[in-house]
């Protein structure tokens, strides 16, 4: 036996003698495993104790835990779920999922504690991954259907944050943390510089190639935004659609669901079969004549009733 091996055996013997045998050793070993999580240096101290009763052991554990929590509180520790960025990611994730599931309605702004989370979501890559997943599902559905030769199979696409992205505008509005500013958005939309959402542009081109009639239905006011919206769409590659349907004077003041439902009903009355409907708001997708399948594009920045 080497000198080093002998030293290890001696240490084990001393530790066993100090900790005791039998039940005392068993209880102390269990205690060591639990306490080690909170105070590693207490492992050495406990080995010096005689065998303890279970009551004494649990009393000691409670004292150690209380001391740990007290020191954390005195150090100004934040709740364990709150990240270093100052938001609670678990709450904000739950809120976003509830929004996408249409369980949270009529909200005016992103909760203040989730503004940073939504920013990270929109520009950090997860939004693009979620968007790509939705489009992949649409394409999988599209691969299973065929446009009829009569030219009456149609798809409905929304415009804002479905075909065209307003993320750059909402960046200056704290990604939905600020209340909706009608005049500021009007100024933005009239510029006609919204970039295409590339995944949706790819889908759009597939629909055109396969012979579907594509109708773009938007809540934008026809009198105010017709020219800028048409130019913006064309500049970003959205050409060849059947019709751009905008909000006319008769629908001013009407909710998006009522307006879009009525326009879809008119298309069905014309003989079109709506095979699919894509939008970033539930108000794009609910109501009459919604289509054979509806697909929700993620958007946690604003709510349109």
Image (cartoon, rainbow, N blue to C red):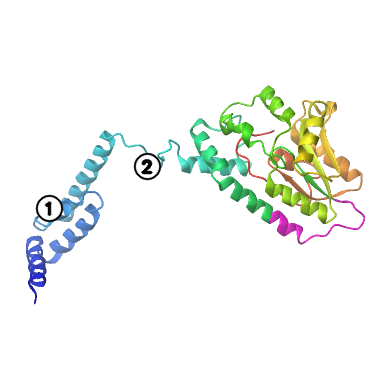
Q: Earlier in the sequence, mark 2 or mark 1?
A: 1
Describe the element under mark 1 as helix, strand or loop: helix
Please tell me in which quadrant of the rendered image residue 11 appears: bottom left
The magenta stretch is: 137-153
Residue under label 1: 45
Instruction: Name, please, the residue furthest toward the bottom.
Output: 1
Q: Residue placed at 78% from the left, 44% from the top?
A: 238
Residue 174: % across, % down: 56, 31
Q: Nearer the viewer, residue 216 or 2?
A: 2
The residue at 28%/36% (across/down) is 73
Q: Residue at x 84, y 26 (%)?
A: 249
Quarter holding the C terminus is: top right
Tally of marks: 2
- Does residue 106 appear in this view? no
Q: Which residue is mark 2?
A: 80
- Relative placement, left or right, of 18 versus 213 is left
Q: Residue at x 76, y 31 (%)?
A: 220
Q: Residues within 10 Å of mark 2 (few under 14, many from 20)?
A: few
Q: Is residue 139 magenta?
A: yes
Visible residue check, residue 98: yes
Of residues 263 and 132, the one nearer the viewer is: 132
Q: On the rendered structure, is 243 left or right of 127? A: right
* x then y, percent, for residue 43: 17, 55
Q: Quadrant of residue 84?
A: top left
Q: Secondary structure at mark 2?
A: loop
């Amino acid at each position: 036996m080497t000198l080093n091996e002998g030293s290890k055996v001696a240490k084990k013997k001393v530790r066993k003698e100090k900790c005791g045998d039998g039940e005392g050793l068993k209880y102390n070993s269990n205690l060591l495993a639990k306490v080690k999580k909170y105070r590693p240096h207490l492992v050495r101290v406990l080995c010096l104790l005689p065998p303890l009763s279970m009551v004494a052991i649990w009393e000691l554990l409670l004292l150690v835990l209380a001391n740990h929590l007290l020191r954390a509180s005195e150090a100004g520790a934040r709740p364990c779920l709150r990240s270093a960025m100052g938001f609670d990611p678990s709450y904000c994730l739950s809120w976003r999922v509830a929004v996408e599931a249409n369980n949270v309605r009529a909200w005016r702004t992103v909760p203040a504690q989730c503004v940073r989370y939504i920013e990270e979501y929109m520009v950090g890559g997860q939004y693009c991954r979620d968007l790509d997943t939705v489009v992949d599902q649409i394409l999988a559905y599209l691969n299973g259907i065929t446009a009829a030769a009569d030219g009456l199979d149609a798809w409905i696409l929304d415009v804002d944050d479905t075909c065209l992205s307003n993320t750059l505008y909402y960046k200056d509005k704290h990604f939905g943390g600020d209340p909706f500013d009608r005049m500021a958005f009007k100024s933005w939309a009239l510029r006609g510089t919204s970039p295409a959402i590339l995944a949706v542009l790819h889908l759009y081109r597939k629909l055109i190639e396969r012979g579907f009639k594509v109708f773009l239905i938007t809540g934008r006011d026809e009198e105010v935004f017709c020219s800028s919206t048409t130019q913006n769409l064309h500049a970003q590659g959205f050409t060849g659609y059947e019709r751009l349907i905008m909000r006319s004077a008769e629908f001013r003041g009407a909710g998006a669901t009522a307006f879009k439902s009525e326009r879809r009903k008119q298309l069905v009355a014309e003989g079109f079969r709506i095979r699919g409907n894509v939008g970033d708001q539930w108000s794009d997708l609910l109501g009459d004549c919604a289509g054979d399948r509806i697909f929700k594009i993620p958007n946690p920045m604003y709510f349109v009733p």
